[in-house]
Amino acid sequence: MGNTRSNPGEKTKRYQGYDVNKVMANNSRHKRPWFWKVLGISLLLSLVIISVVCMVAMRQRKQRTNYLSKLNKANTLDLLLEDHSNITITRSYKGLKDKDDYSTTRFLKKNEKGTLFSYLKTDGYDQDYKEVLSGQKLYRFDGNFTYFYGLVGDDLELLHQDIESEIFQVDGSESVKEQTESSDLMKSVLNYEVQAGDPYTKLYGFETGTVIQKVLTIDIENLIVTSDVESVNDEEIYHYTVTFDGDNKNPKFYRAVKEKDDKRSCTVYYNYDQDKEKKYEFSIPYDVYFTLLDHKDYTVYMDEDCMIEFTTTQMQLQNPESDMELYMKKGE
């Protein structure tokens, strides 16, 4: 047998046993980097997915905002009159809070000189009348008598703003639910959530959060909204339509006024006895009553001493064939 004993100068290797804790610690150190890498990659992917979702949502929101903004820019008085000679706007209201159902019809056109002509007819409204605005002249007919309204101050500008407000506009907070195209028209379904204090709460008494569905018919080429049908729980509450290039509407009472010679003079001193007093002179046909639009804080008098007020009764008692002088003075 060979000698198995070690030489005196040779180092002896000793068996130290199997240290389980030490081996597991070593294995753990080897495995740990993979765990952190997987965790880091997962977090990174999550952030990327969240970022993509946010970007898509922001892009869709921006597209929706741009779309609604384009609708508002395309539906203005000037643009509607730009390519069309005769425009008729009809608006119908149903289920109002404190009023019966009613509708209004507005006819608009511009002549070659750019003068605006507007004919308004109401149906079912408390103050039912027909109205014509031609340039700077405003007439109203109540079924019996015709009244000429002297426009003073910023009356004409406010009237134009009122007409502009009748043309379709979106609030801007609507959500676009559906869009379909057919030929040269597009159908767009919007949802609007009623906000506190908006017109829907005042006119209809709807609670905040009520969802109103708006179904729009849009001319694809110029984005003009030709109809808007609004409903709550499938019950129609409002209908708006626009038609173009129809018949020229000139009401009978206005044609009768145009046939009369302008022989009567009415003078109004606006902001009377103040630094910025203005004098307005109006030429009125015979048999037409003269009146003025209401002005906040102003009182109209029939005498220079401002003692006799020009009330509705005084207006109706006036001689519609004589000249007049009126004084508008701000309350002290």
Image (tube, rainbow, N blue to C red):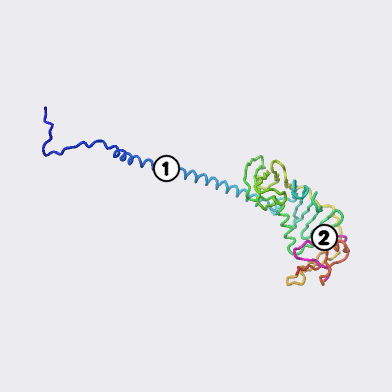
**Quadrant (top left/top right/bottom left/bottom right) for the N terminus:** top left
Task: Say if the magenta span includes residue 74.
Answer: no
Q: Which residue is mark 1?
A: 41
Task: Tell me if 312 is positioned left or right of 154 in this view.
Answer: right
Q: Secondary structure at mark 1?
A: helix
* Nearer mark to the viewer, of 1 and 2: 1
Task: Tell me if 41 is positioned left or right of 96 in this view.
Answer: left
Measuring from the top left, give residue 237's x and y in whole percent: 72, 45
Residue at coordinates 44% horizontally, 44% vertically from top-left?
43
Measuring from the top left, give residue 107's x and y in whole percent: 77, 51
Instruction: Please tell me how crowded label 1 is: few (under 14), some (14-19), or many (20+) other residues with Cα within 10 Å.
Output: few
Q: Which residues are magenta?
A: 285-303
What's the amino acid at mark 1?
Ile
Which comes before the other along the chain, label 1 or label 2?
1
What's the amino acid at mark 2?
Phe
Q: CA distance from mark 1 to mark 2?
A: 79 Å
Q: Give the numbered dot on residue 148.
A: 2
Residue at coordinates 68% horizontally, 47% vertically from top-left?
225
